[in-house]
Image (tube, rainbow, N blue to C red):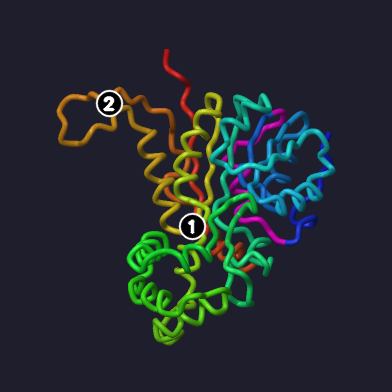
């Protein structure tokens, strides 16, 4: 039987919406669960505790540093937890490789983790000088430096607008091209700040959206999310739960639209009179709208402020 030890006391930071994750996953003793982005292991620990006795957890992460930390945090659970270094876009193949199908629940906690932000060498933030890297996994080839110094002005502006929703994307891209080569995070942040007139009148630092855009582009986060949501449904058993925590509108929009689409029997255009798509609903929404953290949760963990949780249940297959 797994020891009853709270993850909030064993980890260096409080995971986001932990109780809501366990509740919406409908974790039960003896169940099989997948944490597709294990990070420091906070959600994983809460899940495997709720699944004891007899529960199993497959915990994935593309970041080997995160897996090392999670491995220490989850070591007390022994063989009940299987750690795998993999991007969640490999979810189906990983579950198949470890004969971990069907599962009762799959969790995606998206975006960059607190640990990654705190690691100055990774280049995710701009408060300290660091190389322009931003890769989740050292095995990836594309870095932020290659985008910043190699993309054409129009392509760079498109990245900043599409993935950062930055209104000043063209101005920022023009300033970046003129300032090349740019080698560090602080150098890039200074270029962006000058191009946008600095902090005056802005709620967030002027470089925030551009850094988000670069990180998303480097890791193809939105493409990976679309692929993995499809696989998430595939690996679930009947009445299995899919739970996703997103941290910005681009991710949340993809999750919301995916659940809405997979909850309908027909996805033909509204103006089409007769259905030709052959689509069959696979999901039932569990959360009527996105679940947000409470004021107390935000006070305890400021990172949770922008978190949005959505959940759905896999329907029993017809016939």
Q: Was residue 248 drawn as part of the magenta stretch in this picture? A: no
According to the image, label 1 marks what residue?
A: 216
Separation of marks 1 and 2 at Cα, in angstroms: 32 Å
Q: Residue furthest top?
A: 319
| Left or right: where 143 falls relative to 79 | left
- The magenta region covers 13-30
Count residues near mark 1 (Cα–Cα under 10 Å), then give few for <14, some for 14-19, many for 20+. Answer: many
Q: Is residue 134 left or right of residue 172?
A: right
Q: Earlier in the sequence, mark 1 or mark 2?
A: 1
> Quadrant of the image for the N terminus?
top right
Locate the C terminus by quadrant: top left
Asked if 158 appears above or below 72 in the picture, the reply is: below
Q: Secondary structure at mark 2?
A: loop
Q: Give whichever of 182, 272 is nearer the camera.
A: 182
In the image, 166 versus 155, the foreground residue is 155
Write down the residue under mark 2: 277
């Amino acid at each position: 039987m797994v020891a009853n030890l709270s993850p909030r006391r064993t980890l260096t930071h409080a995971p986001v919406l932990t109780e809501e994750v366990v509740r919406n996953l409908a974790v039960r003793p003896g169940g099989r669960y997948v944490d597709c982005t294990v990070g420091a292991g906070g959600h994983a620990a809460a899940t495997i505790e709720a699944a004891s006795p007899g529960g199993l957890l497959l915990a994935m992460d593309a970041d080997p540093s995160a897996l090392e930390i999670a491995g220490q945090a989850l070591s007390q659970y022994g063989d009940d937890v299987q750690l795998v270094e993999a991007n969640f876009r490999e979810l189906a193949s990983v579950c198949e490789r470890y004969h971990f199908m069907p599962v009762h629940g799959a969790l995606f906690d998206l975006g960059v983790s607190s640990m990654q932000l705190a690691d100055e060498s990774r280049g995710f933030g701009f408060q300290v000088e660091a190389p322009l890297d931003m890769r989740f996994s050292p095995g990836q080839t594309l870095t932020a430096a290659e985008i910043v110094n190699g993309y054409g002005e129009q392509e760079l502006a498109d990245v900043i607008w599409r993935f950062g929703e930055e209104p000043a994307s063209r101005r920022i891209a023009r300033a970046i091209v003129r300032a090349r080569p740019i080698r560090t995070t602080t150098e890039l942040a200074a270029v962006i700040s000058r191009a946008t007139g600095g902090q005056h009148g802005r709620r967030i630092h002027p470089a925030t959206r551009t850094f988000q855009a670069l990180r998303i582009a480097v890791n193809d986060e939105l493409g990976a999310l679309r692929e993995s949501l499809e696989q998430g449904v595939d690996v679930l058993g009947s009445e299995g739960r899919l739970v996703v925590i997103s941290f910005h509108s681009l991710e949340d929009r993809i999750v919301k639209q995916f659940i809405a689409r997979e909850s309908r029997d027909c996805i033909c255009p509204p103006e089409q009179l007769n259905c030709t798509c052959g689509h069959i609903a696979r999901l039932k929404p569990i959360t009527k709208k996105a679940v947000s953290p409470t004021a107390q949760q935000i006070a305890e963990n400021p990172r949770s402020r922008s978190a949005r949780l959505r959940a759905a249940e896999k329907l029993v297959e017809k016939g």
